[in-house]
Image (cartoon, rainbow, N blue to C red):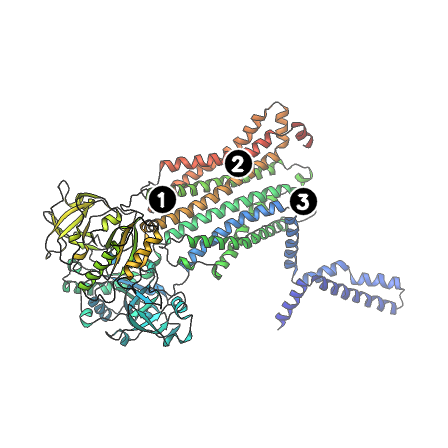
Amino acid sequence: MRFIDSLRHRLHSLFHRDAANAELNDELRFHLDTLIERNIARGMSPRQARTAAQKEFGSFAEATQSTYESRGTALLEDLAQDVRYGVRSLRRQPGFTAVTVLTLAIGIGACTAIFSLVNAVLLRSLPYGDASRLVYLYTPNPHLKEIPQEATGPSNADFFEIRAQVRSFASMTMFDQKSMNLNTGDQPERVGVARVDSSFFHTLEAAPLIGREFRDADQEPGNSRSVVLSYSLWQSLFAGSDDVLSRNITLDGETYHVVGVMPSGFGYPHKTDLAFGNGNIADTQLWVPIALTAQERASRDPSSINALARLAPGVSVKDAQAEMSPLVARLQPLHHDLIFSGGMIALVKPLTQTVLGGARPLMLLLLGAVGSVLLIACANAANLLLARAAGRRHELGVRTTLGASRGRLVRQMLTESLLLASAAGIIGVGLALFFIRALIKLNPGNIPHMETTSLDLRTMVFLILISFVTSILFGTLPALSGTRINVADFLSSAGTRLIVDRRRLRRGLVVAQVALVVVLLTGAGLFLRSYRKVLSVQAGFSPSTLTAGLPVSTSADTEDKRRAFYASVLEGVSSQPGLSAAGLVNYLPLSDSESITTLWVDGYPNQKNQWVESRDVSSGYFTAMQIPLLRGRYFTAEEDTSAPRFVVIINQTFANTYLAGKDPIGHRLRTNSDDPWATIVGVVQDIRNESIETAAVPQIYTPFFSSFAPPIGVTVAVRSSLPQSATIAALRSAVRSIDPNLPLSHIRLMSELTAHATAPRRFQTTLLSVFSGIALFLAIVGVYGLLAYTVRQRTGEIGLRMALGSSRAHIARLILNEGLSLLLAGLGIGIVGGIAFAHLLRSFLYQVPALDPLTFVLVPVLLLIATLVACLVPSIRAAAIDPMVALRHE
């Protein structure tokens, strides 16, 4: 209680200082008057009584100071005084204040925006419990180098064996992804769906916001018509209605009963949550039970399921791997399929490594780049403060002469720095919001949870801390340098050596800025060169081809019916006026979806573990995509029938790899040792399938309608002379004429897919280029500021030189040489840093060496041009000085 009373008293004294001082004066006068009255009562005259009372009471000022110090608020009041003085001082120099605050605000705002991105991607907790304990389980064949290990999950039977026998996992779940047709009353739409078992939400430790999780009974065949909605779908379909648990929805023509709604932000599995997810499903909007028959549960064939487990308490990833490996080794001989029969190992991989591992290097790179921008901004602000301190030399000297300690002056100057940084932080909030919106618009699609980037509490705390740290970074050197005053030198006006020392310090700061800019520009140059290389890659198909995802009709529930349905669609689309070509394909290039198959080439000596990319296409596909034919022919219309046609088309890389020096037309191959041989009838140009940056690999094309198991969803590609909107309308009309409840999805030009494929490189190149541009601008402003200040400081010297015969051209060269010397010093340091930085960037580059000669030539040239521009105005001003006026002023 005593502490609270003391605190209340101190706060009252601090914030009501005038009233507290008035109370103190009244109390002191009361005590003095009491002494005077007592002395008069003893017989003294009023004059004697006052003199005696004053002698006994002591100094009025000392009593006031003693009481003031006893309040315990002296330091706070001194700081408040420093703040008031600092505000008045900065208001007297609005130009200096505005430039300094804006310079710092740019650095703080950019740094905060990138931190908010890093926070959303790496630091913020994932929307499920203790993600560090979640692991993915894989059972890859180590001999199949063509198949990434993370693309091979356990078979159904293996999953249940692992769950029953491995004790390292507290729980396990299986799930896969698919797209389904959601009927909303008018136009059906395609939605991303996760088929999950009853342990899914329990394993993730993610509870529904409303309703319940799936039960074991929900995943029994014939009893799996329950659905859990995402928060966003709950809002859009039912407007957040509380009675949603009594509602039904229609998926693929079947009625599903809503049993739960997940919280906002939960959308697992997101596209970026899986190493190899379904490329056409970016977000999961619905969860339905995965219902396996007894035959499916016992199957050891490769499946599309993903296996996720939560480690038991005290168990590490290494422990789980060690326990799972012997079991997988025992299960491997039970496999007779083409993948697992050749070998199988256990792989346990942390979920966070899969989700965040690929993004971490880029996030660290961006943090380093924006941190360099902030350092350059701090160096600029420090230079401005050094110039200001030189202008305040007389003021600081007088205060030192009158007894002010150096610590007191340093505190005053650091307070002013903190005021500048605080103002910059406030403006930085607005700039950070602007930068964040720009970042989200640039979202390349491969950075996990980037869309959740925002100014949350952690980011605001970071902004406050970075503002404080910034004030120390740019304020300490000017404060220490500006207050290093020798009273004797000051009184004799001999401060030349101090001015020289400050000039060296300012030059050093500018050189450091130039060096950092060289490093950033080197990185940006390498990224730009790589991006240009990517843009110059020929994808191998026409960018103007329109494509659309087409699900199979719910009535086509057999393979023959699916073939008939797709044939009807293809016929209907081809007959639309204005559509010159149409084709079907099971996996579209650059769609993050691939199909590979085993391979036997007749006469090729090494047939072990040969795998190639495979696509099922209709006869019009190559024409619609404008993929050039190099030899032979395309598939014919007769081969677009349900009867198997054992013909195949290969790409150029296939011919070079397996049939080098031979005419491939007429050669035979097959994709299974038990299959009939297929004859090669054509060779087409290579195209980029996996990504623009991945070179073409051997690939085969087989007739779409000869597929043994037609897919349940395809892509239709059309070539048209109509406007895009008219082409889409014609495509929709053709599909609706066959099944009015079928939605088209992912309608886009191939140019959009190409742009999407290059988006990650465009994102990182844009950001690094923007940061480098900001850094270059700030550094050039720093060079200009130093030279302008130098001209002002050396006005007398310049006037004397001109009076002694120096030409104006000579004076201009003098200032120009000053700027170029800063450039050369910064270049020397920066190129060394740039070389080191370039080696760190090697994994980010595409067909560009780390020590790219063009980049290391263009960066100095760019800086030279920028420096010459910065030197221009100070040089002209120096050359225009009137020697008589300068000497008179001196």
Q: Nearer the viewer, mark 3 or mark 1?
A: 1
**Would you identify the image quadrant in which residue 598 lies?**
bottom left
Kindly state the secondary structure of the residue where label 3 is placed: helix
Quarter holding residue 322: bottom left
Q: Position of residue 323 (x, y in %)?
A: 24, 65
**C-alpha separation, residue under disc 3 versus residue under disc 1:** 55 Å
Q: Amino acid at mark 1?
A: Tyr
Residue 315 visible, this angle: no
Circle 3 residues within 10 Å: few <14, some 14–19, many ≥20: few
Task: Kindly indicate the quadrant of the structure image that contains residue 553.
Answer: bottom left
Could you say which is closer to the camera, residue 744 or residue 53? 744
Q: Nearer the viewer, residue 426 or 78?
A: 426
Reading the image, the residue beneath label 2 is 870
Q: Tag 2: residue type?
A: Ala
Q: In terms of depth relative to the viewer, which is nearer, 721 or 270?
A: 721
Disc 2 or 1, which lies upstream in sequence? 1
Q: Secondary structure at mark 2?
A: helix
> Which three-letter amino acid code belongs to the residue tagged 3?
Glu
Q: Which residue was labeled with disc 3?
A: 395
Per the image, the residue denoted by label 1 is 531
Between discs 3 and 1, the one toward the N terminus: 3
Which residue occupies 64% across, 37% down? 495
